[in-house]
Image: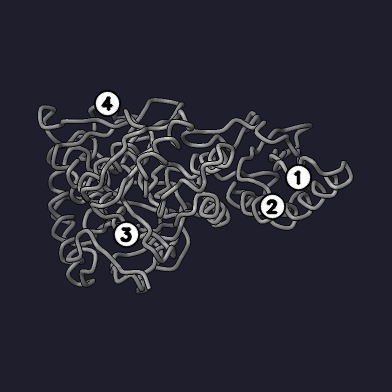
């Protein structure tokens, strides 16, 4: 039996009624703060006929307008800043490559609270002050590195601020300093696992846990990483617009992510209508930040698809849980009228014995959509006869047809011929002019 540990047990195990009272009070204060200090949001509320005094509890959340990434771009750079500039001590920014970048501001207290959220995630993964935490998320404007770095310091762990890249050096430090907790994207964790095998270093690893996020990944990919690195892989969720990693985190049960709901109120809505859906219904995740002061977003549409549940967790935490991501409303591919999520294809690939390095190439030929799935062969597969490779390709096509309901061209690529990623993996190449 695993001993459960908590970073802030008085909060993580709080009763629903106590948490609800905290949320109601903080939400009311936050709405007043935003209305007073953010002209952009004040106009949105005025246009909808909502005044701060109309929002007294979480039941009143649905009265407020939504915010989207378009709003953040329109208000760039200072239009959503809710404190005097001299009170802000840091910005972070999204890694998007189209349109205006999104920047988020932090006061020192915002950073402290963010670090506490990440500390909860590290402790939930088994972290203590005796651990060595290797942070291989990117630093700089990306929130991954600074977030887990701050959480590790809060816990009191020895922190290796490695950032991403130079994988052989990462593994050398991992072995020499006996890293016990690895923090990075799941795709980079899979790449580290491949490189560990090439270096013959698996027996030198002391890893016990991994905290992986910043991109969607399947349960099959999780098990593959766990097998390669000999650790327990925990999901973590966050987004720059809200704070960064640590909005929610997975405990040792690996059955969903606990939302730090003393800081963030989560809703699930119908992405088409905006209607709030009950617990257990799948829809788009919406967050309201109730403690962040420099850049507090109310009802921010994440575009992530998941489910919220109030079912009890054997870890003892009472925080609401969100399922692992089931896709995104904006990353979802519509191919010949069929909704396709990359995670569906990844599940088929890994369950068929392929590695998690793949690319989806979507095009339009003679007014008809085409889908090509490029996936690497493992070294063992690559040594198969031509007949066996043809059989593998045919079997994979059939499984994809069964999963997706449409035909996909399968291209079996040589081992290591698809570019590896040290950050977020580029999985989809859409060549259509839509």
x, y percent for residue 410: 76, 42
Label whose residue precedes the other's in the sequence (2 or 1): 2
x, y percent for residue 101: 37, 27
Q: Which of 45 and 305 is in front in this view?
A: 305
**What kind of element bears circle 3?**
helix
The numbered mark at residue 77 is 4
Q: In the picture provided, is 157 more to the left or to the right than 410?
A: left
Q: Nearer the viewer, residue 338 or 5?
A: 5
Residue at x 89%, y 45% (from the top left corner): 387
**What kind of element bears circle 1?**
helix
Check whether the beta carbons of the residues at disc 3 and disc 1 lie within 8 A of each other.
no
Q: Name the residue under label 2.
A: 353
Q: In the picture provided, is 192 more to the left or to the right than 212?
A: right
Q: Mark 3 points at which residue?
A: 124
Check whether the beta carbons of the residues at disc 3 and disc 2 lie within 8 A of each other.
no
Q: Which of marks 2 and 1 is in front?
A: 1
Check whether the beta carbons of the residues at disc 1 and disc 4 lie within 8 A of each other.
no
**What kind of element bears circle 2?**
loop
Q: Mark 1 points at which residue?
A: 381
Label whose residue precedes the other's in the sequence (3 or 4): 4
Q: Which of marks 3 and 4 is in front?
A: 3
Label whose residue precedes the other's in the sequence (3 or 2): 3
Q: How far apart are marks 2 and 4 (CA)?
A: 46 Å
Label whose residue precedes the other's in the sequence (2 or 4): 4
Q: Nearer the viewer, residue 223 or 104?
A: 223
The numbered mark at residue 1 is none
Q: Quick check: 397 above or below 71?
A: below
Q: In the picture provided, is 13 more to the left or to the right than 395?
A: left
- Residue 367, image quadrant: top right
Check whether the beta carbons of the residues at disc 2 and disc 1 lie within 8 A of each other.
yes
């Amino acid at each position: 039996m695993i001993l459960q540990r908590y970073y802030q047990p008085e909060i993580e195990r709080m009763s629903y009624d106590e948490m609800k009272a905290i949320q109601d009070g903080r939400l009311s204060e936050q709405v007043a703060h935003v209305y007073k200090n953010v002209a952009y949001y004040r106009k949105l509320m005025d246009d909808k006929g909502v005044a701060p005094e109309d929002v007294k509890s979480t039941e009143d959340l649905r009265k407020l307008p939504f915010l989207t990434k378009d709003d953040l771009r329109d208000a760039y750079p200072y239009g959503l800043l809710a404190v005097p500039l001299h009170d802000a001590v840091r910005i972070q920014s999204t890694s998007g490559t189209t349109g205006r970048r999104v920047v988020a501001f932090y006061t020192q207290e915002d950073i402290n609270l963010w670090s506490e959220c990440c500390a909860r995630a590290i402790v939930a993964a088994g972290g203590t002050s005796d651990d060595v935490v290797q942070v291989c998320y990117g630093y700089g404007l990306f929130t991954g590195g600074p977030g887990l770095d701050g959480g590790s310091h809060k816990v009191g762990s020895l922190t290796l601020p490695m950032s991403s890249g130079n994988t052989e050096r990462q593994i050398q430090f991992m072995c020499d300093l006996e890293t016990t907790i690895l923090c990075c994207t799941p795709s980079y964790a899979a790449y580290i696992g491949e490189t560990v095998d090439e270096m013959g270093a698996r027996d030198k690893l002391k890893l016990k846990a991994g905290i992986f996020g910043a991109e969607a990944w399947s349960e099959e990919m999780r098990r593959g990483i766990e097998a390669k690195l000999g650790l327990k892989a925990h999901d973590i969720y966050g987004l720059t617009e809200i704070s960064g990693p640590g909005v929610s985190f997975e405990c040792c049960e690996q059955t969903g992510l606990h939302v730090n709901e003393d800081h963030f109120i989560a809703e699930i809505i119908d992405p088409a209508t905006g209607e709030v859906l009950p617990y257990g219904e799948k829809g788009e995740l919406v967050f309201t930040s109730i403690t962040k002061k420099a850049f507090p977003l109310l009802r921010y549409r994440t575009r992530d698809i998941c489910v919220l549940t109030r079912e009890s967790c054997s870890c003892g935490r009472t925080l609401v849980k969100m399922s692992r991501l089931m896709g995104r409303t904006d990353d979802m591919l519509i191919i010949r009228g069929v909704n396709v999520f990359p995670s569906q294809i990844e599940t088929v690939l890994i369950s068929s014995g392929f590695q998690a390095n793949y690319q989806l190439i979507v095009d339009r030929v003679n007014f008809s959509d085409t889908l090509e799935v490029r996936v690497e062969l493992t070294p063992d597969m690559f040594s198969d006869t031509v007949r066996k490779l043809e059989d593998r390709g045919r079997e994979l096509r059939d499984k994809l047809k069964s999963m997706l309901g449409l035909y996909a061209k399968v291209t079996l690529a040589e081992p290591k011929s698809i570019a590896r990623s040290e950050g977020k993996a580029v999985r989809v190449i859409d060549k259509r002019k839509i």
